[in-house]
Amino acid sequence: MFNKLSVVAAVSVLSLASQAEAVVIDFETVPGAVPSEGLAISNQFAATAGVTFSLANGNTPVLAEVGGPRTAFDGVGPDGPAAGENIGQFFLTDDGLTSGVTVSPLIVSYSTATQNVSGEILDIDRGESFVISAFDSLVGGALLDTITINAGDADTGNGVATNWAFNRASADILRIEFAGARSGPGFFGLGFDNFSSGVTVTPAPLSAPATLPLVAAGLCMIGFLAHRRKG
């Protein structure tokens, strides 16, 4: 007779393919497209992460690639993060134009309300500031929470990836807006990356052929544990 441990072990092996996974968007891959400088990002992540991206002025944010040409900020070189910031090769920016001291706010819209959200804003320095606001509606709605980040705060600086997060008591966030500005001369650009949308996705069940190795592994584990008990 099999003991409870063997059954639990087998079930654990067989359940690996169906575990829910938190979705993190790092823009190194884009569903249905190849990441490239200037690629417009809107609804590509709607199916996989439950979010769409837009700008408040009706335009669409675009991808920026680390290195020249400069389309977002001057960090460690054009669009260059500081060393060790885990940015990869691509991140999201606004309109890709480096002019003016303000940009149209980035808007993240959810298909289903979420609770815990986090991400990184790049290169907050030289009199720059960000206000990140969470709302309970796709249009208008109540302001749920606000994060303000100013140049000189902890974890800000030239090319630095500054962490931010909303952790709500319940799933009530349907829209997040990122508004940034610069108080001094120069230009302002958005750098947005490593976005944990708070949405979890459960992979579709594996087909029968794909599950066979897992089934075999589970049966072997049961047999091994049963043999040890007899011995």
Image (cartoon, grey):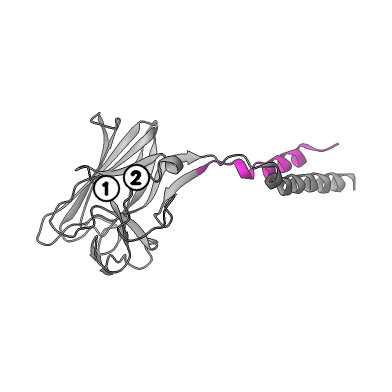
Residue interval drawn in magenta = 1-21
Identify residue type, mark 1: Thr
Q: How crowded is mark 1: few (under 14 residues within 10 Å), some or many (20 or more)?
A: some
Q: Residue furthest right?
A: 231
Task: State the residue at coordinates (22%, 42%).
Answer: 58
Q: In this view, does 97 lie above or below 212?
A: below
State the residue at coordinates (27%, 47%). 60
Residue at x 24% of width, y 52% of height: 94
Give the residue at mark 1: 60
The quarter of the picture where residue 98 lies is: bottom left
Residue 76 placement, left or right of 13? left
- Expressed as whole percent of the image width and height from the top left, the position of residue 92 reads 31, 54
Main secondary-structure element of the magenta-colored stretch: helix
Residue 56 placement, left or right of 51: left
Considering the image in quadrants, where does the N terminus appear? top right
Name the kind of residue labelled 2 in the image: Ala
Q: Mark 2 points at which residue?
A: 165
Between 108 and 22, the one nearer to me in the picture: 108
> Residue 38 location, x and y as percent?
30, 58
Along the horizontal axis of the image, is 137 left or right of 13? left
Q: Where is residue 84 in the image (x, y as percent from the top left)?
A: 38, 66
Res 14 quadrant in image: top right
